Image (tube, helix red, strand yellow):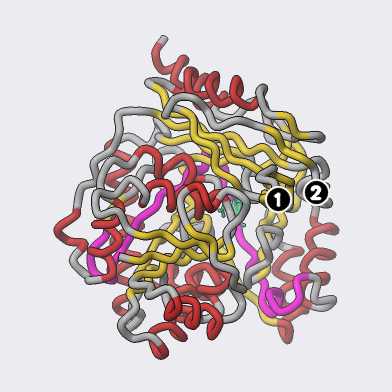
Amino acid sequence: MNVLILGSGGRENAFAELLSRSTSAPKLYIGPGNGGSDLYAERVELNLADPSGIAAACKQHGIHLVLIGPEQPLVEGLVDYLNVHLPELMVIGPTASAARLEGSKAFSKVLMQKYDIPTARYRSFTRGQLLEALEYVAAHPLPVVIKADGLAAGKGVIISENTAEALETTRSILEQARFGEAGQQVVIEEFLKGIELSVFILTDGQNFVLLPEAKDYKRVADGDQGPNTGGMGAVSPVPFFNEELREKVERKIIRPTLEALQSEGIFYSGFIFFGLMKVNQEPYVIEYNCRMGDPETEAVLPRIDSDFMDLLLACAEQRLGAHAELKLAEKKALTVIVAAKGYPDAPEKGKKIVFTQPAGAETLVFHAGTRKEPDGSYLSSGGRVLAITSLADDLEAAAESSYQYINTITFEGATYRKDIGQDIINYIRKAEH
Ligand code: AMP
Ligand code: GLY
Protein backbone atom coordinates (compact mmCIF):
# COMPACT_ATOMS: atom_id res chain seq x y z
CA MET A 1 0.00 0.00 0.00
CA ASN A 2 1.48 3.37 -1.03
CA VAL A 3 0.27 6.32 1.05
CA LEU A 4 0.85 10.01 0.34
CA ILE A 5 0.42 12.46 3.21
CA LEU A 6 -0.07 16.04 2.05
CA GLY A 7 1.21 18.92 4.17
CA SER A 8 4.40 20.25 5.70
CA GLY A 9 3.86 20.54 9.43
CA GLY A 10 4.31 18.59 12.63
CA ARG A 11 0.81 17.18 12.11
CA GLU A 12 1.83 15.40 8.92
CA ASN A 13 4.92 13.89 10.56
CA ALA A 14 2.72 12.66 13.42
CA PHE A 15 0.44 10.96 10.86
CA ALA A 16 3.52 9.38 9.28
CA GLU A 17 4.92 8.25 12.62
CA LEU A 18 1.67 6.46 13.51
CA LEU A 19 1.33 4.91 10.04
CA SER A 20 4.93 3.70 10.23
CA ARG A 21 3.82 1.56 13.19
CA SER A 22 1.10 -0.19 11.15
CA THR A 23 1.53 -3.97 10.77
CA SER A 24 0.71 -3.61 7.07
CA ALA A 25 3.90 -1.54 6.65
CA PRO A 26 2.63 0.95 4.06
CA LYS A 27 5.19 2.73 1.90
CA LEU A 28 4.90 6.34 3.02
CA TYR A 29 5.38 9.54 1.04
CA ILE A 30 5.00 13.11 2.34
CA GLY A 31 4.68 16.17 0.15
CA PRO A 32 5.92 18.82 0.34
CA GLY A 33 6.98 17.76 3.85
CA ASN A 34 9.83 19.28 5.83
CA GLY A 35 13.29 18.53 7.17
CA GLY A 36 12.02 15.62 9.28
CA SER A 37 9.82 13.85 6.74
CA ASP A 38 12.54 11.43 5.68
CA LEU A 39 12.57 9.93 9.18
CA TYR A 40 9.39 8.07 8.18
CA ALA A 41 8.74 8.66 4.51
CA GLU A 42 10.02 9.61 1.11
CA ARG A 43 9.63 13.31 0.44
CA VAL A 44 7.82 14.41 -2.68
CA GLU A 45 8.29 17.91 -4.11
CA LEU A 46 4.86 19.30 -4.78
CA ASN A 47 2.74 22.38 -4.40
CA LEU A 48 -0.44 22.05 -2.34
CA ALA A 49 -2.14 24.66 -4.54
CA ASP A 50 -1.53 22.59 -7.70
CA PRO A 51 -4.06 19.72 -7.96
CA SER A 52 -2.78 18.50 -11.33
CA GLY A 53 0.79 18.32 -9.96
CA ILE A 54 -0.51 16.32 -7.00
CA ALA A 55 -2.42 13.95 -9.28
CA ALA A 56 0.75 13.49 -11.35
CA ALA A 57 2.76 12.70 -8.20
CA CYS A 58 0.12 10.12 -7.20
CA LYS A 59 0.45 8.42 -10.58
CA GLN A 60 4.23 8.55 -10.56
CA HIS A 61 4.50 6.88 -7.16
CA GLY A 62 1.58 4.47 -7.57
CA ILE A 63 -0.26 6.00 -4.62
CA HIS A 64 -3.28 4.08 -3.32
CA LEU A 65 -4.39 6.44 -0.56
CA VAL A 66 -3.94 10.17 0.04
CA LEU A 67 -4.36 11.80 3.43
CA ILE A 68 -4.76 15.58 3.26
CA GLY A 69 -3.49 17.47 6.32
CA PRO A 70 -4.26 21.21 5.98
CA GLU A 71 -7.57 22.97 5.30
CA GLN A 72 -6.66 25.20 2.36
CA PRO A 73 -6.50 22.50 -0.35
CA LEU A 74 -9.65 20.88 1.06
CA VAL A 75 -11.61 24.12 0.95
CA GLU A 76 -10.26 24.78 -2.56
CA GLY A 77 -11.56 21.45 -3.86
CA LEU A 78 -8.53 19.16 -4.08
CA VAL A 79 -10.66 16.14 -3.15
CA ASP A 80 -13.17 16.93 -5.90
CA TYR A 81 -10.33 17.20 -8.40
CA LEU A 82 -8.77 13.88 -7.35
CA ASN A 83 -12.16 12.13 -7.36
CA VAL A 84 -12.67 13.15 -10.97
CA HIS A 85 -9.15 12.59 -12.29
CA LEU A 86 -8.10 9.55 -10.24
CA PRO A 87 -11.35 7.78 -9.38
CA GLU A 88 -9.52 4.69 -8.06
CA LEU A 89 -7.50 6.71 -5.54
CA MET A 90 -8.68 6.55 -1.93
CA VAL A 91 -8.79 10.03 -0.42
CA ILE A 92 -9.07 10.96 3.25
CA GLY A 93 -10.61 14.42 3.42
CA PRO A 94 -13.87 16.19 2.60
CA THR A 95 -14.93 17.69 -0.74
CA ALA A 96 -15.07 21.49 -1.10
CA SER A 97 -18.78 21.49 -0.39
CA ALA A 98 -18.30 19.52 2.84
CA ALA A 99 -15.19 21.53 3.83
CA ARG A 100 -17.41 24.63 4.06
CA LEU A 101 -17.85 23.47 7.64
CA GLU A 102 -14.51 25.26 8.14
CA GLY A 103 -14.30 27.33 4.96
CA SER A 104 -17.38 29.43 5.70
CA LYS A 105 -18.35 30.39 9.22
CA ALA A 106 -21.65 31.77 7.90
CA PHE A 107 -22.38 28.33 6.38
CA SER A 108 -21.53 26.47 9.57
CA LYS A 109 -23.60 28.85 11.72
CA VAL A 110 -26.66 28.42 9.48
CA LEU A 111 -26.24 24.65 9.68
CA MET A 112 -25.95 24.70 13.48
CA GLN A 113 -28.93 26.97 13.86
CA LYS A 114 -31.10 24.95 11.48
CA TYR A 115 -30.32 21.66 13.24
CA ASP A 116 -30.30 22.92 16.84
CA ILE A 117 -26.62 22.30 17.45
CA PRO A 118 -25.55 24.37 20.47
CA THR A 119 -23.43 27.37 19.46
CA ALA A 120 -23.11 31.06 20.32
CA ARG A 121 -26.04 33.28 19.21
CA TYR A 122 -25.09 35.26 16.11
CA ARG A 123 -26.00 37.13 12.97
CA SER A 124 -24.08 37.31 9.72
CA PHE A 125 -23.83 40.24 7.34
CA THR A 126 -22.56 40.63 3.78
CA ARG A 127 -20.65 43.63 2.36
CA GLY A 128 -23.92 45.14 1.16
CA GLN A 129 -25.26 45.06 4.74
CA LEU A 130 -22.59 47.24 6.35
CA LEU A 131 -25.03 49.64 7.99
CA GLU A 132 -27.11 46.83 9.48
CA ALA A 133 -23.94 45.17 10.73
CA LEU A 134 -22.81 48.39 12.43
CA GLU A 135 -26.22 48.83 14.04
CA TYR A 136 -26.16 45.26 15.30
CA VAL A 137 -22.64 45.68 16.73
CA ALA A 138 -23.53 49.00 18.36
CA ALA A 139 -26.36 47.34 20.30
CA HIS A 140 -24.44 44.13 21.12
CA PRO A 141 -23.42 43.43 24.73
CA LEU A 142 -19.65 43.25 25.38
CA PRO A 143 -17.43 41.45 24.80
CA VAL A 144 -18.55 40.84 21.23
CA VAL A 145 -16.97 38.31 18.88
CA ILE A 146 -16.38 39.33 15.24
CA LYS A 147 -15.40 36.70 12.70
CA ALA A 148 -14.44 36.95 9.05
CA ASP A 149 -16.43 34.32 7.16
CA GLY A 150 -13.63 32.56 5.26
CA LEU A 151 -10.17 31.14 5.94
CA ALA A 152 -7.93 33.78 7.48
CA ALA A 153 -4.96 31.74 8.73
CA GLY A 154 -6.20 31.77 12.32
CA LYS A 155 -6.38 35.58 12.43
CA GLY A 156 -10.00 36.07 11.46
CA VAL A 157 -11.51 36.15 14.96
CA ILE A 158 -11.52 39.39 16.94
CA ILE A 159 -12.90 39.56 20.45
CA SER A 160 -13.67 43.13 21.39
CA GLU A 161 -14.39 44.63 24.82
CA ASN A 162 -15.14 48.02 23.40
CA THR A 163 -17.98 49.09 21.10
CA ALA A 164 -16.01 51.76 19.21
CA GLU A 165 -13.26 49.24 18.45
CA ALA A 166 -15.82 46.59 17.48
CA LEU A 167 -17.44 49.01 15.03
CA GLU A 168 -14.05 49.83 13.55
CA THR A 169 -13.22 46.12 13.22
CA THR A 170 -16.51 45.39 11.46
CA ARG A 171 -15.89 48.29 9.08
CA SER A 172 -12.33 47.14 8.39
CA ILE A 173 -13.54 43.67 7.41
CA LEU A 174 -16.58 44.58 5.33
CA GLU A 175 -15.49 47.93 3.91
CA GLN A 176 -11.68 47.87 3.79
CA ALA A 177 -11.41 44.13 3.01
CA ARG A 178 -8.98 43.58 5.89
CA PHE A 179 -9.14 39.81 5.32
CA GLY A 180 -9.62 40.07 1.56
CA GLU A 181 -12.06 37.54 0.13
CA ALA A 182 -12.41 35.86 3.53
CA GLY A 183 -14.23 38.97 4.71
CA GLN A 184 -17.03 38.99 2.13
CA GLN A 185 -19.24 38.21 5.09
CA VAL A 186 -18.85 38.75 8.78
CA VAL A 187 -20.32 36.76 11.67
CA ILE A 188 -21.06 38.73 14.84
CA GLU A 189 -21.64 36.50 17.83
CA GLU A 190 -22.05 36.43 21.57
CA PHE A 191 -19.02 35.73 23.74
CA LEU A 192 -19.12 32.35 25.47
CA LYS A 193 -17.35 32.13 28.81
CA GLY A 194 -16.03 28.70 29.69
CA ILE A 195 -13.21 26.21 29.11
CA GLU A 196 -12.19 25.19 25.60
CA LEU A 197 -11.39 21.74 24.38
CA SER A 198 -11.00 20.05 21.01
CA VAL A 199 -12.75 16.85 20.02
CA PHE A 200 -11.91 14.93 16.85
CA ILE A 201 -13.65 12.31 14.79
CA LEU A 202 -12.90 10.37 11.65
CA THR A 203 -16.08 9.79 9.63
CA ASP A 204 -16.82 7.82 6.49
CA GLY A 205 -20.00 9.77 5.79
CA GLN A 206 -22.14 7.45 7.90
CA ASN A 207 -20.28 6.18 10.93
CA PHE A 208 -17.57 7.80 12.98
CA VAL A 209 -14.73 6.99 15.32
CA LEU A 210 -14.01 9.29 18.22
CA LEU A 211 -10.30 10.08 18.55
CA PRO A 212 -8.71 11.21 21.83
CA GLU A 213 -9.61 14.76 22.79
CA ALA A 214 -7.08 17.55 23.39
CA LYS A 215 -6.63 21.04 24.71
CA ASP A 216 -4.35 23.42 22.88
CA TYR A 217 -2.60 26.62 23.95
CA LYS A 218 -3.19 29.32 21.37
CA ARG A 219 -1.47 32.38 22.87
CA VAL A 220 2.24 32.80 22.32
CA ALA A 221 3.29 33.49 25.92
CA ASP A 222 2.91 31.91 29.36
CA GLY A 223 -0.35 32.54 31.20
CA ASP A 224 -2.24 32.85 27.88
CA GLN A 225 -0.66 36.23 27.14
CA GLY A 226 0.32 37.81 23.83
CA PRO A 227 -1.01 37.28 20.33
CA ASN A 228 -2.82 34.20 19.04
CA THR A 229 -0.76 31.60 17.21
CA GLY A 230 -1.49 28.36 15.39
CA GLY A 231 -0.92 26.69 18.77
CA MET A 232 2.03 26.54 21.17
CA GLY A 233 1.33 23.16 22.73
CA ALA A 234 -1.32 20.59 23.51
CA VAL A 235 -2.28 17.97 26.04
CA SER A 236 -4.36 14.82 25.73
CA PRO A 237 -6.46 13.55 27.47
CA VAL A 238 -8.44 16.45 28.98
CA PRO A 239 -9.60 15.36 32.47
CA PHE A 240 -12.86 17.33 32.51
CA PHE A 241 -13.94 15.52 29.33
CA ASN A 242 -15.58 12.86 31.49
CA GLU A 243 -18.16 10.24 30.55
CA GLU A 244 -21.05 12.66 31.08
CA LEU A 245 -19.59 15.40 28.88
CA ARG A 246 -18.52 12.89 26.23
CA GLU A 247 -22.06 11.52 26.05
CA LYS A 248 -23.45 15.07 25.69
CA VAL A 249 -20.95 15.97 22.99
CA GLU A 250 -21.84 12.85 21.01
CA ARG A 251 -25.61 13.29 21.45
CA LYS A 252 -25.91 17.07 21.08
CA ILE A 253 -23.06 17.87 18.71
CA ILE A 254 -21.35 15.03 16.83
CA ARG A 255 -24.39 12.98 15.76
CA PRO A 256 -26.54 16.02 14.94
CA THR A 257 -23.70 17.47 12.84
CA LEU A 258 -23.36 14.27 10.81
CA GLU A 259 -27.15 14.05 10.44
CA ALA A 260 -27.34 17.70 9.42
CA LEU A 261 -24.77 17.16 6.67
CA GLN A 262 -26.67 14.11 5.43
CA SER A 263 -30.00 15.96 5.49
CA GLU A 264 -28.41 18.71 3.40
CA GLY A 265 -27.21 16.10 0.91
CA ILE A 266 -23.55 16.76 1.75
CA PHE A 267 -21.29 13.71 1.84
CA TYR A 268 -18.55 14.28 4.42
CA SER A 269 -15.64 11.87 4.65
CA GLY A 270 -12.52 12.65 6.67
CA PHE A 271 -11.66 14.25 9.98
CA ILE A 272 -13.83 16.76 11.79
CA PHE A 273 -12.29 18.88 14.52
CA PHE A 274 -14.92 20.26 16.89
CA GLY A 275 -13.62 23.35 18.71
CA LEU A 276 -15.83 23.34 21.79
CA MET A 277 -16.49 25.59 24.75
CA LYS A 278 -17.75 23.97 27.95
CA VAL A 279 -20.06 26.52 29.57
CA ASN A 280 -20.96 25.16 33.01
CA GLN A 281 -21.67 21.52 32.07
CA GLU A 282 -22.90 22.23 28.53
CA PRO A 283 -20.83 21.92 25.33
CA TYR A 284 -21.11 24.57 22.58
CA VAL A 285 -19.48 24.61 19.16
CA ILE A 286 -17.03 27.50 18.74
CA GLU A 287 -15.93 26.32 15.33
CA TYR A 288 -15.61 23.32 13.07
CA ASN A 289 -12.42 22.46 11.23
CA CYS A 290 -12.38 20.06 8.30
CA ARG A 291 -9.06 18.47 9.32
CA MET A 292 -7.01 17.55 12.37
CA GLY A 293 -5.45 20.29 14.51
CA ASP A 294 -1.81 21.21 14.72
CA PRO A 295 -0.31 20.73 17.34
CA GLU A 296 -3.24 18.68 18.72
CA THR A 297 -2.45 15.82 16.31
CA GLU A 298 1.05 15.52 17.78
CA ALA A 299 -0.50 14.90 21.24
CA VAL A 300 -3.52 12.83 20.11
CA LEU A 301 -2.00 10.31 17.68
CA PRO A 302 0.83 9.02 19.88
CA ARG A 303 -1.88 7.79 22.29
CA ILE A 304 -3.51 5.58 19.64
CA ASP A 305 -2.59 1.89 19.73
CA SER A 306 -5.04 0.76 17.03
CA ASP A 307 -3.65 0.13 13.56
CA PHE A 308 -4.07 3.52 11.89
CA MET A 309 -3.70 2.14 8.37
CA ASP A 310 -6.67 -0.20 9.00
CA LEU A 311 -8.67 2.78 10.25
CA LEU A 312 -7.91 4.93 7.18
CA LEU A 313 -8.78 2.06 4.85
CA ALA A 314 -12.03 1.44 6.70
CA CYS A 315 -12.84 5.14 6.32
CA ALA A 316 -12.06 5.17 2.60
CA GLU A 317 -14.11 1.99 2.05
CA GLN A 318 -16.98 3.19 4.22
CA ARG A 319 -16.76 0.43 6.77
CA LEU A 320 -15.89 2.49 9.83
CA GLY A 321 -18.95 1.06 11.58
CA ALA A 322 -16.87 -2.00 12.43
CA HIS A 323 -14.17 0.16 14.09
CA ALA A 324 -16.28 1.85 16.73
CA GLU A 325 -13.70 1.71 19.51
CA LEU A 326 -10.08 2.75 19.25
CA LYS A 327 -7.42 1.06 21.32
CA LEU A 328 -5.69 3.75 23.37
CA ALA A 329 -2.43 3.70 25.30
CA GLU A 330 -2.94 4.32 29.02
CA LYS A 331 -0.41 7.16 28.76
CA LYS A 332 -0.98 10.90 28.87
CA ALA A 333 0.60 13.05 26.16
CA LEU A 334 1.97 16.57 26.34
CA THR A 335 3.33 18.48 23.35
CA VAL A 336 5.41 21.65 23.48
CA ILE A 337 6.05 23.69 20.35
CA VAL A 338 9.50 25.17 19.94
CA ALA A 339 8.98 28.22 17.75
CA ALA A 340 11.34 30.72 16.14
CA LYS A 341 12.15 34.10 17.63
CA GLY A 342 9.57 36.63 16.40
CA TYR A 343 6.76 34.06 15.99
CA PRO A 344 3.90 34.64 15.15
CA ASP A 345 4.44 38.05 13.48
CA ALA A 346 7.87 37.81 11.88
CA PRO A 347 9.67 34.55 12.67
CA GLU A 348 13.41 34.43 12.05
CA LYS A 349 14.39 31.76 9.57
CA GLY A 350 17.58 29.99 8.57
CA LYS A 351 18.89 29.39 12.11
CA LYS A 352 20.82 26.21 12.84
CA ILE A 353 19.03 23.65 15.04
CA VAL A 354 21.19 21.07 16.80
CA PHE A 355 19.60 18.17 18.63
CA THR A 356 19.81 14.41 18.96
CA GLN A 357 16.98 11.92 18.64
CA PRO A 358 15.63 11.17 22.15
CA ALA A 359 16.92 7.93 23.60
CA GLY A 360 13.64 6.29 24.70
CA ALA A 361 10.30 5.90 22.94
CA GLU A 362 8.63 8.16 25.48
CA THR A 363 9.69 11.42 23.81
CA LEU A 364 8.97 12.10 20.15
CA VAL A 365 10.36 14.96 18.07
CA PHE A 366 8.14 16.05 15.20
CA HIS A 367 9.68 18.45 12.72
CA ALA A 368 7.51 21.39 11.66
CA GLY A 369 9.32 24.45 10.23
CA THR A 370 12.64 22.75 9.44
CA ARG A 371 14.75 22.21 6.37
CA LYS A 372 17.44 19.58 5.95
CA GLU A 373 20.75 20.70 4.47
CA PRO A 374 22.83 18.47 2.15
CA ASP A 375 25.25 17.81 5.05
CA GLY A 376 22.34 16.44 7.15
CA SER A 377 22.08 19.44 9.47
CA TYR A 378 18.82 21.26 10.09
CA LEU A 379 17.86 24.91 9.60
CA SER A 380 14.67 26.61 10.75
CA SER A 381 12.29 27.50 7.92
CA GLY A 382 9.03 28.51 9.60
CA GLY A 383 7.38 29.91 12.70
CA ARG A 384 6.72 26.69 14.54
CA VAL A 385 9.91 24.68 14.24
CA LEU A 386 9.64 21.50 16.34
CA ALA A 387 6.88 19.78 18.29
CA ILE A 388 8.13 17.79 21.27
CA THR A 389 5.67 15.20 22.60
CA SER A 390 6.24 13.11 25.70
CA LEU A 391 4.12 10.23 26.91
CA ALA A 392 3.98 9.33 30.59
CA ASP A 393 1.70 7.91 33.28
CA ASP A 394 0.73 11.44 34.28
CA LEU A 395 0.92 14.88 32.71
CA GLU A 396 3.46 16.17 35.21
CA ALA A 397 5.95 13.51 34.18
CA ALA A 398 5.18 14.12 30.50
CA ALA A 399 5.80 17.85 30.95
CA GLU A 400 9.06 17.16 32.75
CA SER A 401 10.29 14.91 29.93
CA SER A 402 9.35 17.36 27.18
CA TYR A 403 10.98 20.32 28.94
CA GLN A 404 14.08 18.35 29.88
CA TYR A 405 14.48 17.35 26.27
CA ILE A 406 14.00 20.94 25.05
CA ASN A 407 16.90 21.97 27.31
CA THR A 408 19.18 19.77 25.22
CA ILE A 409 18.29 21.54 21.94
CA THR A 410 20.57 24.26 20.61
CA PHE A 411 18.58 26.74 18.55
CA GLU A 412 19.20 30.48 18.63
CA GLY A 413 16.09 32.42 19.60
CA ALA A 414 14.09 29.29 20.58
CA THR A 415 10.71 30.47 21.84
CA TYR A 416 8.40 28.21 23.79
CA ARG A 417 5.85 28.35 26.57
CA LYS A 418 7.02 27.03 29.92
CA ASP A 419 3.49 26.36 31.19
CA ILE A 420 1.97 23.89 28.73
CA GLY A 421 -0.41 21.62 30.66
CA GLN A 422 0.07 23.50 33.93
CA ASP A 423 -3.61 24.53 34.16
CA ILE A 424 -4.68 20.91 33.69
CA ILE A 425 -2.10 19.66 36.19
CA ASN A 426 -3.45 22.19 38.73
CA TYR A 427 -7.02 21.13 37.92
CA ILE A 428 -6.17 17.46 38.58
CA ARG A 429 -4.38 18.34 41.84
CA LYS A 430 -7.39 20.34 43.02
CA ALA A 431 -9.79 17.53 42.11
CA GLU A 432 -7.65 15.07 44.08
CA HIS A 433 -7.70 17.16 47.29
P1 AMP B 1 -11.27 30.28 15.87
O1 AMP B 1 -10.35 30.95 14.90
O2 AMP B 1 -12.68 30.14 15.41
O3 AMP B 1 -10.66 29.05 16.46
O4 AMP B 1 -11.38 31.26 17.12
C1 AMP B 1 -10.21 31.59 17.79
C2 AMP B 1 -10.48 31.64 19.25
O5 AMP B 1 -11.39 32.69 19.56
C3 AMP B 1 -11.15 30.39 19.81
O6 AMP B 1 -10.24 29.38 20.07
C4 AMP B 1 -11.76 30.94 21.09
O7 AMP B 1 -10.78 31.04 22.09
C5 AMP B 1 -12.15 32.34 20.69
N1 AMP B 1 -13.57 32.40 20.36
C6 AMP B 1 -14.14 32.24 19.15
N2 AMP B 1 -15.48 32.38 19.23
C7 AMP B 1 -15.77 32.64 20.53
C8 AMP B 1 -16.98 32.88 21.26
N3 AMP B 1 -18.17 32.91 20.67
N4 AMP B 1 -16.88 33.09 22.58
C9 AMP B 1 -15.68 33.10 23.20
N5 AMP B 1 -14.51 32.88 22.57
C10 AMP B 1 -14.54 32.65 21.25
N1 GLY C 1 -4.33 24.32 16.80
C1 GLY C 1 -5.49 24.83 16.19
C2 GLY C 1 -5.71 24.42 14.80
O1 GLY C 1 -5.09 23.52 14.27
O2 GLY C 1 -6.59 25.01 14.19
In-front residue for pair 62/344 = 62
Residue 110 picture location, percent across and down? 48, 74
Residue 262 picture location, percent across and down? 30, 76
Residue tagged 2: 350
Q: Is residue 97 left or right of residue 322?
A: right
Total number of numbered labels?
2
On the rendered image, what quadrant is the C terminus found in? top left
Going 38% across and 68% down the picture, which residue do you hit? Answer: 92
Going 59% across and 80% down the picture, which residue do you hit? Answer: 50
Q: Is residue 20 left or right of residue 420?
A: left
In magenta segment, residue 192 = yes
Residue 275 picture location, percent across and down? 49, 52
Q: Is residue 365 left or right of residue 179?
A: left
- Identified by mark 2, the residue type is Gly
- Residue 254 is at least partly visible in this image: yes
In-front residue for pair 136/320 = 320
Q: Is residue 131 above or below residue 115?
A: below
In magenta segment, residue 24 = no
Residue tagged 1: 373
On the rendered image, what quadrant is the N terminus found in? bottom left
Going 46% across and 39% down the picture, which residue do you hit? Answer: 299
Secondary structure of the residue carrying tag 1 is: loop
Magenta stretch in the rendered image: 179-208
Going 53% across and 52% down the picture, which residue do you hit? Answer: 38
| Residue lying farthest to the bottom in this orientation | 84
- Pointer 1 local density, CA inside 10 Å: few below 14, some 14–19, many at least 20: few
Q: Is residue 206 left or right of residue 73?
A: left
Quarter assignment of residue 386:
top right
